[in-house]
Amino acid sequence: MTADLQAIRDSLAPGAKQQLITKGVSFGSLKRNIDGAWDTSSVQGLPAPSLTSSDASHPPSLIIMPFHQTGAVISLRQFTNNAFNHHHGIQSEERFGVGVDADGDGFVNELTRADVTAVTVFQATLPVPGRLIANDPRSRKGRAARGASLLRNRLRGFATSPNCH
């Protein structure tokens, strides 16, 4: 999909505007001003780093980053490296280097390249998350409705939170 979006981008002459559609998914439209500058104000669904353009000779990358809450991680491997470091305080060799104690905890080579590969492959084989549906029809209906209500209320509260960003 990224390659398709980049091909559309690369076909834009100054003054042109083009819909960014690939594999049936619309990402809005990209415009190139008469002076060659890129206008990404109508692009949708791509993270800010993919829309950055410093000048006419440096177009936005339009890279699709499907992982993480903000869609800012390009691969499951990068997601894995981030999660181990951020959530567990475990640094990988491929990110910090071999023999490096980046966090000063007295341990080096906390995750080898093979470790990260194994965890990434494991995650890639996990089933897609879904709902656990009760067997009893009355219970099933009540639980699904309650869960949907709880989620709506949680999202409503999050959207109005002063800490929401």
Image (cartoon, helix red, strand yellow):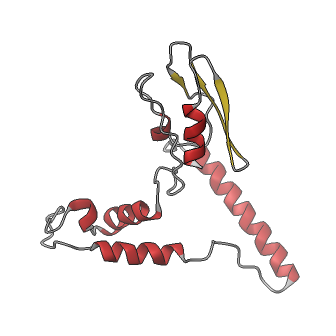
The spot of residue 45 in percent (x, y) is: 61, 43
Q: Residue furthest bottom?
A: 135
Q: Is residue 155 above or below residue 52?
A: below
Could you tell me if residue 91 is visible in this image? no
Q: Residue visible at 24% across and 67% down?
A: 93
Q: Residue visible at 59% across and 41% down?
A: 5
153 left or right of 52 in image: right
Q: Give the image quarter of residue 126.
A: bottom right
Q: Residue visible at 42% across and 29% down?
A: 58
The spot of residue 7 in percent (x, y) is: 57, 39
Q: Give the image quarter of residue 6.
A: top right
Of residue 151 and residue 109, the one placed in the foreground of this image is 109
- Give the total number of marks visible in the rendering: 0
Q: Residue furthest right?
A: 137
Could you tell me if residue 79 is visible in this image? yes
The spot of residue 91 in percent (x, y) is: 26, 66
163 left or right of 7 in image: left
The spot of residue 86 in percent (x, y) is: 34, 61
Q: Is residue 22 above or below residue 82?
A: above
Of residue 63 and residue 164, the one placed in the foreground of this image is 63
Q: Residue visible at 51% across and 13% down?
A: 35
40 left or right of 18 in image: left
